[in-house]
Structure formats: C-alpha cells, structure tokens
Image (cartoon, rainbow, N blue to C red):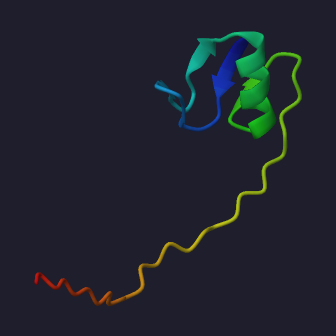
Amino acid sequence: MKITCLTTFLDGSDRFEKDDVRTVDDTRGAYFVAQGWATADGVEVAETTLEVIDLTVQDGVMGQEANHG
C-alpha cells in the first residue's frame, strides 16, 4: 500500500516524515491511516481529536537517608 504521511511519526525504528510517500505492507498502512497519521488511496482517513497534555514539571523533594553502621 502506498501512503502519504500527514505528520512525522515513528514506527519501531522507522521514521516517517510529514509529506513522505512510502510503500508499506497493507497491515501497517491500514494502521497508520486508522491512527490519522497517513492517507492512502481508497482508504478513509480517521478523524483525530488530539488533546493538549500539560507536562509542567512540579517541584518536589525526596528525602533519602543512608545509614552505614
């Protein structure tokens, strides 16, 4: 299956760049299209609803003590 990447993503050790046109096996291609990462002729693109995740680091103190004898 020939796919056109809609975004940059990794699949295992393979990196797919946005706007790349690649040939992959049908199972992987269908998975990429279902996730909304790629398009393919004759396969309907899934609608993605990505949420913004807040990754703000919060301060924290972890007390550790080691007693050696």
Q: Residue at x 53, y 37 (%)?
A: 8
Q: Where is residue 11 in the image (x, y as percent from the top left)?
A: 56, 29
Q: Which residue is drawn at 60% across and 69% down?
A: 53
Q: In which quarter of the image is the N terminus?
A: top right
In this orientation, which residue lies closer to the viewer: 30 or 22? 30
Q: Where is residue 40 in the image (x, y as percent from the top left)?
A: 77, 20
Query: Which residue ends up furthest to the left in the rendered image?
Result: 69
Would residue 13 be found to the left or right of residue 67 on screen?
right
Vertical arrangement, residue 4 with respect to residue 68, above or below: above
Q: Which residue is drawn at 26% across and 86% down?
A: 64
Indicate the quadrant where residue 22 lies. top right
Q: Position of residue 20 (x, y in %)?
A: 55, 22
Would residue 4 be found to the left or right of residue 17 on screen?
right
Q: Where is residue 15 in the image (x, y as percent from the top left)?
A: 48, 27
Vertical arrangement, residue 48 with respect to residue 66, above or below: above
Tally of numbered discs: 0
Indicate the quadrant where residue 46 lies. top right
Q: Quadrant of the C terminus?
A: bottom left
Query: Which residue ends up furthest to the front in the rendered image?
Result: 69
In this orientation, which residue lies closer to the viewer: 3 or 54? 54
Q: Which residue is drawn at 78% across and 56% down?
A: 49
